[in-house]
Structures are given as structure tokens and as C-alpha cells.
Amino acid sequence: DIQMTQSPSSLSASVGDRVTITCRASQSISTFLNWYQQKPGKAPKLLIYTASSLQSGVPSSFSGSGSGTDFTLTISSLQPEDFATYYCQQSYSTPFTFGPGTKVDIK
Amino acid sequence: EVQLVESGGGLVQPGGSLRLSCAASGFTVTSNYMHWVRQAPGKGLEWVSVIYSGGSTYYADSVKGRFTISRHNSKNTLYLQMNSLRAEDTAVYYCGSSDYIGAPIDYWGQGTLVTVSS
């Protein structure tokens, strides 16, 4: 099975900050990497798919990059509504594992 | 408009069974790749199972042999039959859909809570 790791596990940031979250796969997954945002009590929301494609309706402040085993999610200017937990997920092979999550909270 | 609505969660004793349902609208469950994902209280997301449009099914090791994913074409509904339930199966269970193999889960239900406790 492919293992996914994320760093950091949590971070504190201010509105307007640039935030970068890293995701690493235990083996190459090409660009089959997705990013989700989840707020408390809500279902996850797709942000980025195939490593760098922005889901329709998602602000352009979100971007993704990477291929193979190393990926990043960047929020160029953090907004109040961006405080949430972010998960990466590989869709290269079953089981379609998620990373452990990165919680972004207010500094 | 695409919508997924889960039901069937509740309290069940260890060793018991429960069947979750996910009613879909705006698309047909047989044309998409349908997933179950769960989240234990205060924990991260765990992928559970998928059924492909062609009918192939796959499971996480943690539920293999105990859970069965299926769908009902005319009811346009996805199911998860959960047997031999354990305390560690306690979670909110989400259904979701993908458009093709390798695609992300772009539509999600609101989730249904399963609690396994005596």
C-alpha cells in the first residue's frame, strides 16, 4: 500500500500569510495527487486534483505542484475562511490513502 | 444538481451489523466510481472502499472481509454492509463519487455517524 505523509501536522498563520503544506508518497504516484479542505463538522471539499489542477469554484489563491513522490499545496494569501484542515490523497492505486492532515489555525 | 445523502448510521453493539445507504441524484451511481470514506472522532480521513462503474470492488485492509460495498441501479443508491463491527469502526461515514479511475472524489455526502459500543 502507498503511505502518505504530510508536514507540518499543524501551523499557525495570520491573514495574508503565504502558507505551504507538503505531502510525500511512499512510492511514485505520478500526478495522481489530490488536496481537500475540511472544516469542523463538514464533509471534505476538493481543492486541487492531479497535483496542480484547480477545482472549479476554488479561489486562485490555492495552487498545487509536484510529481512522483513530493507535492505541495500553497495558499498565496491566507483568508479567514481558509482556516481548516487540509488533506492530501493519492488516487494512483487502491487503497486510495489519505495523508494525516495539516491543521491551519489563526496565529 | 449532484447530491449524495447518506443514511443508516446509529448505535450498534460490537460484533453487530449495520447497512449504510447513500442516495444519489443528478447522476447515476453505475456510471461513476463510488467511494466510502470514514473519519473517527477527532481523527483524519480514512478511505474505506470503492466500486467501479464496471462493478469491481476494493477495500482497505482494515475492513476487508467484514464490509461489502454494493449499489442498486434502479434505486440509484450505494450501500455499505458492515458486519462484525468493532469499536474502532466508530466514525462518520461519507460516500463520495469520482468520474473515472484515478479521479479525485469531487462530490461528497454530509456523512452518517456509526457508533460501535456496548
Image (cartoon, coloured by chain):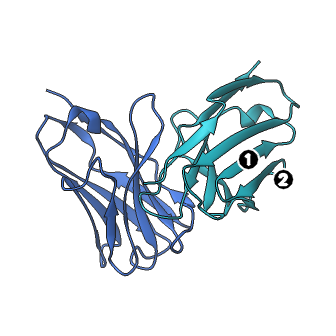
Chain colours: A cyan, B blue
Which residue of the protein is positioned furthest toward the left in this rendering? B15
In this rendering, position of residue B54 left or right of residue B20:
right
Kindly give the residue lying farthest to the top in the view shown: A107
- The residue lying at 47 percent from left, 57 percent from top is A96
Image height check: is B115 above or below B65?
above
Q: Mark 2 lies on which chain?
A: A
**Residue B10 vs residue B106, the one in the foreground:** B106
Q: What element carries label 2?
A: loop
Q: In this rendering, does residue B61 appear at all?
A: yes
Q: Which residue, given by chain and number where applicable, does mark 1 sit on?
A: A72
Tally of numbered discs: 2
Q: Quadrant of residue B117?
A: top left
Amino acid type, label 1? Thr
Question: Who comes first in sequence, dot 1 or dot 2?
Answer: 2
Q: Is residue A59 left or right of residue B104?
A: right
Q: Do the residues labelled 1 and 2 touch (CB within 8 Å)?
A: no
Quadrant where the C terminus of chain B lies?
A: top left
Residue with the mark numbered 2: A60
Tag of residue A104: none
Where disc 1 sits, the SS reads strand
Labels 1 and 2 within one chain: yes
Between residue B106 and residue A69, name the one nearer to us: A69
Q: What's the residue at 28%, 61% (across, down)?
A: B79
Residue B49, given in percent of the width and then of the height, sits at 35, 58
Quarter of the picture holding the N terminus of chain B: bottom right
| Circle 2 residues within 10 Å: few <14, some 14–19, many ≥20 | few
Above or below for B43 versus A59 = above
Residue A58 visible within the image: no
In this rendering, is residue B113 above or below B65?
Answer: above
